[in-house]
Image: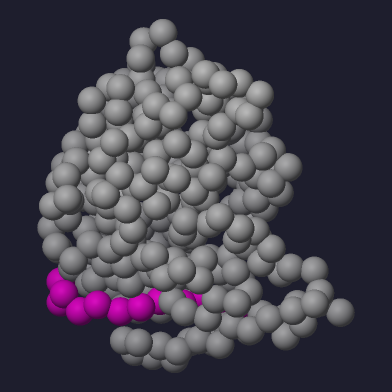
């Protein structure tokens, strides 16, 4: 026996989908089925929870300004045939990235000139900001999705940018900000989860392609995990960890309880939020396909199966 997932789509604007776990007592069919403890949100361009029966993403046609929700096909991925029919050759932009966690914490942008562009690539569908002012706003506060800035885990599928920018989180002074550089202009990944002091262990050199690319570009998809968590045995230091393709690349200390102070701001995607109006700095050209976040620092035993699932599903 196995878990059967049925996806169907009807047209046009608000298609309906049936996505049911027929055998809930059997082993999980999707990675979130038994991994929702302390979850903050879960976004993907595929179905990642068997109980979720809603759309994956809402797009806007850049020529007609018509909006439409898009669901999964029988391979669990977003229905790119429907997406391309809707586009009709026009550019597409992301209005809403739907939360599959069951909490309804969608990432949203209603201002059209701030919406990231959606690319219906057949191998790796994604969206990307323009590096100028695009940003999606998670409909929850940074405090709630990060345990008030003290702990969190982000497990995602991203394409590292070729410019100095910040992919997500909240902006602020060096001792306060909560975001990651993916990459910075030195080619390093930085994990500034409440601390970016020069003497802290917060970065690692990103692996380069075999053939050198201009301007230190990476141009590669990867599976990344960013973890900040408490260390019960250490009264003065917390831990920040970054894993790439299932391999730990960074494990460094951070002063205990040093955290982001502006916890009532939204959490930003494509840029770190800088204030409650949603403006941001260091806007990103990182590409996004999947992003699962927990408001606690998760163990390797918890994180690794999700990493392996992402790597295998997206052929990374």
Residue shown at 53%/25% (left/top)?
A: 238
Residue 68 drawn in magenta:
yes
Left or right placement of residue 284 versus residue 151 in this view = left
Left or right placement of residue 158 versus residue 225 in this view = left
Could you say which is closer to the camera, residue 312 or residue 215?
A: 312
Left or right placement of residue 194 versus residue 233 in this view = left
Of all residues, the one furthest to the front in this rendering is 235
Residue 198 on image: x %, y %: 36, 10
Residue 33 on image: x %, y %: 66, 67
Please state, as top left, top right, bottom left or bottom right, where the C terminus lies in the image.
Answer: top right
Of all residues, the one furthest to the top in this rendering is 199
Q: In this view, does 38 lie above or below 82?
A: above
Residue 204 drawn in magenta:
no
Please state, as top left, top right, bottom left or bottom right, where the N terminus lies in the image.
Answer: bottom right
Range covered by the magenta-colored residues? 63-74
Asked whether residue 270 is in view, the answer is: no
Residue 222 on image: x %, y %: 53, 39
Q: In this view, does 202 lie above or below 154?
A: above
Please identify the quarter of the rendering in which residue 105 is found.
Answer: bottom left
Residue shown at 13%/58% (left/top)?
A: 113
């Amino acid at each position: 026996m196995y878990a059967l997932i049925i996806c169907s789509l009807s047209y046009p604007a608000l298609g309906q989908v049936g996505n049911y776990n027929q055998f809930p007592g059997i082993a999980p069919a999707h990675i979130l089925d038994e991994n929702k403890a302390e979850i903050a949100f879960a976004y993907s361009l595929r179905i990642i929870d068997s109980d979720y029966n809603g759309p994956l993403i809402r797009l806007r046609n850049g020529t007609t300004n018509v909006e439409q929700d898009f669901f999964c096909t029988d391979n669990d991925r977003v229905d790119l045939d429907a997406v391309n029919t809707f586009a009709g050759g026009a550019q597409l932009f992301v209005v809403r990235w739907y939360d599959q966690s069951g909490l309804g914490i969608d990432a949203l942008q209603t201002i059209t000139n701030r919406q990231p562009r959606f690319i219906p690539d057949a191998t790796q569908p994604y969206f990307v900001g323009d590096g100028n002012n695009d940003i999606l706003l998670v409909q929850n506060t940074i405090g709630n999705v990060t345990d008030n800035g003290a702990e969190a885990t982000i497990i995602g599928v991203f394409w590292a940018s070729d410019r100095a920018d910040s992919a997500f989180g909240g902006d602020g002074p060096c001792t306060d900000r909560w975001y990651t550089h993916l990459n910075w202009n030195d080619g390093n990944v930085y994990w500034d989860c409440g601390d970016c002091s020069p003497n802290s262990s917060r970065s690692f050199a990103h692996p380069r392609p075999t053939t050198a690319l201009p301007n230190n570009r990476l141009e590669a998809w990867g599976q990344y995990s960013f973890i900040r968590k408490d260390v019960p045995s250490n009264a003065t230091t917390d831990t920040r960890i970054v894993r790439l393709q299932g391999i730990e690349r960074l494990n460094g200390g951070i002063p205990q309880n040093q955290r982001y102070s502006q916890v009532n701001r939204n959490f930003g995607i494509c840029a770190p939020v800088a204030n409650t109006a949603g403006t941001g700095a260091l806007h990103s050209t990182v590409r996004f396909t999947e992003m699962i976040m927990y408001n606690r620092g998760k163990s390797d035993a918890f994180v690794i199966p999700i990493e392996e699932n992402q790597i295998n599903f997206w052929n990374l």
